[in-house]
C-alpha cells in the first residue's frame, strides 16, 4: 500500500511538472508571436497617441466652411473731411475785437465765431446811413413835385428829374444795404443802424457750416487780413472722417469707387469703423509707386482723431467659401509647410500637411488638405508638433 501511494504521488508530480512546462512554453511562444507581430506592424511617424490625461488638455474642433472675403489691406492716416471743413477768415482787414467760441465747441451754421473792427465796415455803414437819408429826401421831393405838376405849378421836365433822382437814391440805398450784408449784417441790423444812425465798427464773422471748432488762432487785438494763414478759425463736420491710405501698385486694379471699407485704429482695437472708397489717385507716387486711396468713414461719436494711424481693409471681390480652422490649430513646420493634427477618437492624432490662404476673424482658410466635418486639434496643435519632433530624435 505504501508503495502504491508513493507511486501515485510521483505520477501526479510528473504530470504537474509537464503542465507547467507546457504553460511556460505556450506563454513564451505567445510573447514571441506578439513581438514578431509588433515588428511586422509599421509605425506611423506622423501619428501620436495620447493618454487619457493628455488628451484632456488638447481641445479639438470640427472643420467647417467659412465665407472668406477677398480683400486688400493698407495703412494710412485719419484726417478731417475736407469737403465738410471750413477755414474761416475775414473778408476785410481789421482788428479782432471779440472771440466768442473756443476749440472743441460745437457751433451752428450762421453762429458768430468772432468779430473784427474794420474801417471798411465803418465806411459801408456811413454810406448806408447817407443813402437812406437821400432816399427819404428824394421821395419827399417827388411827392411835392407831383402835387405841383398836377396844379401846373412845375414844369414837366423838373418833375421827371425828381423821378430820376428818387430812383437813383433807391438804387444807392439798395447797393449800400447789399454791401452791409457782405459784412454779415442782417436786414434787422441794417434797419436798426439806419434808424439809430449810429455806426457799429464790429463786423461778425459767422460759421458757414454746422460742426466743431477744430482750430482757433483768433485772439482779441490781433490784426487779420483776408486769407491770412493760419486761419483764425477752422470748423469741421466731425461725424465723417477721411482715411488716406497708400496702396501698392499691384493691388490698384482690384480697387473701385464705392467699395466698402473696414477701418481699425490702435485706440479702439475692438471696434470696426465702416466707410467706402471715394477717390483713387490718378497718378502713383514717384518714389514709392503707391496710390493714395481716400475713403469716407462714418464717425458719429467723433472717436477718430486727425493724424491717427489706421489700417483699412477693402473688399475687392465676392466672398470665397472654404474650409476654415482656428489659427492656433495650424502649425508652421521648420521646413515651411503648414500642418494640422487630425483625429477621429481624440486619442490618436495624425499630422496632415495643408495649404493655407487668407486669415479672417481668427480663422485660417484651408485651401487643400482637410475637409469639412473632420476633427482637428486646436490650441494643442503646437504641443503635438513638438512631441512628434522629440519622438523622431
Image (cartoon, helix red, strand yellow):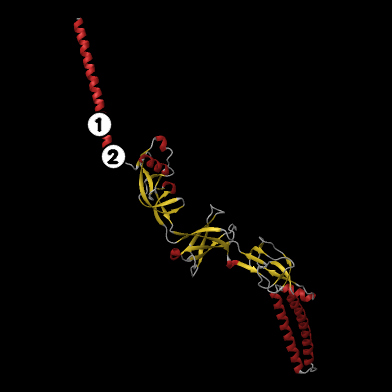
Q: Is residue 380 left or right of residue 215?
A: left
What residue is disc 1 on?
A: 33
Disc 2 secondary structure class: loop
Q: Nearer the viewer, residue 152 or 345?
A: 345
Quadrant of res 140: bottom right
Q: Residue 248's spot in the image, x, y percent?
A: 46, 63
For marks 2 and 1, the one nearer the N-term is 1
Disc 1 secondary structure class: helix
The image quadrant where one finds the N terminus is: top left
What residue is disc 2 on?
A: 42
Q: Is residue 155 left or right of residue 377?
A: right
User: Is residue 248 placed above or below 371 in the rendered structure?
Assistant: below
Q: Residue 333's spot in the image, x, y percent?
A: 39, 48
Quadrant of res 196: bottom right
Quadrant of res 170: bottom right
User: Is residue 347 placed above or below 232 in the rendered structure?
Assistant: above
Asked if residue 24 shows in the view, the reply is yes
Q: Residue 384's spot in the image, x, y percent?
A: 40, 42
Give the residue drawn at x 23%, y 20%: 19
Q: What crowding class fits label 2: few (fewer than 14 Cα within 10 Å), some (14-19), or many (20 or more)?
A: few
Amino acid at each position: 500500500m505504501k508503495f502504491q501511494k508513493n507511486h501515485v504521488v510521483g505520477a501526479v508530480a510528473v504530470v504537474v511538472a509537464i503542465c507547467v512546462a507546457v504553460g511556460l512554453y505556450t506563454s513564451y511562444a505567445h510573447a514571441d508571436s506578439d513581438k514578431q507581430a509588433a515588428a511586422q506592424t509599421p509605425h506611423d511617424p506622423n501619428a501620436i497617441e495620447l493618454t487619457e490625461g493628455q488628451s484632456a488638455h488638447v481641445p479639438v474642433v470640427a472643420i467647417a466652411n467659412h465665407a472668406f472675403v477677398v480683400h486688400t489691406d493698407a495703412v494710412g492716416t485719419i484726417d478731417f473731411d475736407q469737403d465738410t471743413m471750413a477755414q474761416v477768415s475775414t473778408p476785410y482787414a481789421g482788428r479782432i475785437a471779440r472771440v466768442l467760441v473756443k476749440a472743441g465747441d460745437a457751433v451752428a451754421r450762421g453762429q458768430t465765431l468772432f468779430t473784427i473792427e474794420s474801417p471798411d465796415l465803418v465806411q459801408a455803414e456811413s454810406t448806408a446811413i447817407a443813402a437812406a437819408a437821400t432816399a427819404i429826401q428824394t421821395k419827399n421831393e417827388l411827392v411835392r413835385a407831383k402835387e405841383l405838376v398836377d396844379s401846373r405849378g412845375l414844369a414837366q421836365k423838373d418833375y421827371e428829374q425828381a423821378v430820376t433822382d428818387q430812383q437813383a437814391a433807391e438804387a444807392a440805398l439798395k447797393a449800400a444795404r447789399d454791401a452791409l450784408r457782405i459784412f454779415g449784417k442782417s436786414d434787422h441790423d441794417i434797419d436798426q443802424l439806419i434808424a439809430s444812425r449810429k455806426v457799429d465798427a464790429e463786423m461778425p464773422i459767422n460759421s458757414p457750416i454746422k460742426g466743431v471748432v477744430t482750430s482757433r488762432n483768433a485772439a482779441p487785438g490781433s490784426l487779420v487780413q483776408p486769407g491770412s494763414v493760419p486761419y483764425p478759425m477752422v470748423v469741421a463736420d466731425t461725424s465723417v472722417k477721411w482715411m488716406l491710405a497708400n496702396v501698392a501698385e499691384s493691388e490698384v486694379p482690384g480697387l473701385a469707387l464705392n467699395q466698402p471699407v473696414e477701418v481699425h485704429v490702435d485706440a479702439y482695437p475692438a471696434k470696426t469703423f465702416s466707410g467706402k472708397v471715394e477717390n483713387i489717385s490718378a497718378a502713383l507716387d514717384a518714389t514709392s509707386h503707391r496710390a493714395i486711396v481716400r475713403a469716407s468713414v462714418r464717425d458719429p461719436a467723433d472717436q477718430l482723431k486727425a493724424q491717427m494711424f489706421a489700417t483699412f481693409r477693402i473688399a475687392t471681390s465676392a466672398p470665397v467659401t472654404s474650409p476654415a480652422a482656428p489659427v492656433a490649430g495650424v502649425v508652421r513646420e521648420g521646413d515651411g509647410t503648414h500642418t494640422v493634427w487630425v483625429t477621429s477618437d481624440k486619442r490618436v492624432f495624425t499630422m496632415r500637411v495643408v495649404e493655407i490662404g487668407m486669415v479672417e476673424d481668427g480663422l485660417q482658410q484651408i485651401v487643400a488638405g482637410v475637409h469639412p466635418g473632420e476633427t482637428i486639434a486646436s490650441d494643442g496643435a503646437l504641443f503635438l508638433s513638438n512631441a512628434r519632433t522629440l519622438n523622431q530624435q
